[in-house]
Image (tube, rainbow, N blue to C red):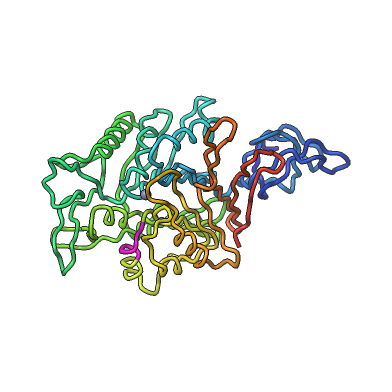
Amino acid sequence: MSSFKYAAKNAAPIYESVVNDKGKKIINKILMGTYVTILEQQGNWYRVATAGPDGWIHSDNLTDYMGLKIFFLDVGQGDGVLIETGKYRLLIDAGPDNSMHSYLTKWQFRYLLDSDKKIHIDYVIISHFDTDHYKGLIKILDDNNFTFGTLIHPGILKFATKDNPYTTGLGNTIKHSGKTILTHVFDDLLNINEPHPFNRDTSNFMEALHKAHSEGRITATQRYEQGSSILNTTVEGKPFNIEVLAPFTENTPNGKGFMYWKDVGKTINGHSLVIKLYFGNRTVLLGGDLNTLSQEYLINQYGNDHPFEVDVAKSCHHGASDFTEKFMQLVNPYATVISSGDNEGYSHPRADAIGCAGKYSKSKRPLVYSTELARSTDINSNKILFGMINLRCNGSHIFMSQMKERKNDADLWDAYEIL
Ligand SMILES: [Zn+2]
C-alpha cells in the first residue's frame, strides 16, 4: 500500500467515522488532486491526514494521480498563477508584492521547508515586465529556499526615464515597411550587454536574478516568442503541452523587433507572453495584459486558423475595458478568471469586461471568477483573508472552486464543473 494518494473527485467527503461500511458525519471536503497521507485501511475505507480535519475517505474517491492544479492567487492588482502537476511546477507571474512568496512558503510548500527541502520551480514565466506581474518575484528569487529551472520572458525591458538616450522608455524604434518597430530585444537576461540603466524595479529584479544565478539556484533565462513550446510531454499518460501563442516578432534589416503601439504601456502589455496549456483534452489560456491593439494584431497574424479557443481563460489585463469583443469571441471559454485588486485606481474589473466574459462564452451558464470577489475581510479582526480561484483537472474533467467566505470544513467549497 502506497503511503499517499490524491482525491479522485472534487469536494470528496471525509467522514468522522465508518459504521457498517457507511461514512458517518462529513467533517471535511477536499478538492480533486488534494494530497492525502494514508494512516490506516479498513476494507474500502482509508483513514487519512489531509488539508483540513483528518478522517475516513472511501477508496472510490482516491487515486494515484494528482492531475493538474492551477492556483489563481489573489495578489491584489496584478497576476500570480501557480501551475502544479506531479512532475512539474510553473509560476506565471508573481504579483506586485510579497503575497505569492508568503503563499508559497507559508502554505503551499511549507511541507517541503518543514522537512528542510528546497522549493523547486521548473519554469518561471514572466508575462511582461510590468511591476504588477514581476515585482513579487524579487523576494522569491532572493530566497535561498527556492531553486529554479528556466526563467522565460518576452524580451522587452523598461529603461530608467532619466539618462535614457533612446527614443522610447523601451529602447529605440525604427520605421520599417510603414510600421514603427522596437529594436531593443533582450534574450538571455543573465548576459545583457546594455550600456544604459534600466528602471529601478527592473534593476532590482536583475540584481536578484544574478544573485540566484551566482548561488547556482537558477539554471537559465530565455526569451520565448510565438511558436515556442515550453513543455511538450505527458503527465500521468496524458498529453501535457504548454505553448506560446504570442508575442510575434517582426523582421527588420536590424534583426528582430516588436511592433511599437502608441506608447510604452500599450507596447509592453501588448507583447505579453500568451500561454496555452493543454492537459488531456482540456485547455487553458493565460493572456497576460493584451489590449485592443495587440488583440487585433494577433487576430490578423493568425487569420482563420487561430489557436485561441479554450475551456478556461484568464481574462486579459485584469478586466480592463481595453479589449476587443472579437478576441473574446474567439477565446469562447466556459469560464473566465479575472485577477485584480481592491482599492486601485483602474476600477478593475470593468463592468463591460465582466459582461462580455459572460456573453462570449460557450456555456449556457458562463462562469466569471474574480480574485477580488474571492477576497474577504474578517469583520471582527478587520484582517484581509486573501482569495484564490482553484482549478483542478484530470485531463477530461475540470472543476473550479473557491472557498466559501464563512469557514466550515464540512462545507468549504463553492465548486463548479466546467462544461
Ligand atoms: Zn498587469
Residue at point 46% right, 55% down?
314
Rendered view: 131 above or below 269: above
Rendered view: 219 above or below 311: above
Please indicate whether residue 397 sits to the left or right of residue 269 in the image.
right
Please indicate whether residue 414 sits to the left or right of residue 209 in the image.
right
Residue at point 30% right, 51% down?
154
Residue 209's quadrant in the figure? top left
Please indicate whether residue 176 sits to the left or right of residue 71 in the image.
left
- List the single residue furthest toward the bottom: 304
117, 15: nearer the viewer: 15
Q: Tell whether position 293 is magenta.
A: yes
- List the single residue furthest toward the left: 165
Quadrant in which the C terminus appears: bottom right
Residue at point 36% right, 44% down?
132
Residue at point 41% right, 70% down?
326
Provide residue 195's location: percent of width, then percent of height: 13, 40
Provide residue 35's location: percent of width, then percent of height: 62, 39
Provide residue 281's location: percent of width, then percent of height: 55, 61
From the image, give the main secondary structure of the stretch colored magenta.
Answer: helix
333, 275: nearer the viewer: 333
Rendered view: 102 above or below 317: above
Provide residue 193's location: percent of width, then percent of height: 16, 42
Question: Total marks drawn?
Answer: 0
Quadrant in which the N terminus appears: top right
Rendered view: 221 above or below 211: below
Q: Tell whether position 61 is magenta.
A: no
Residue 62's quadrant in the figure? top right
Instruction: Point out the stretch of residues depicted in magenta.
Output: 290-295
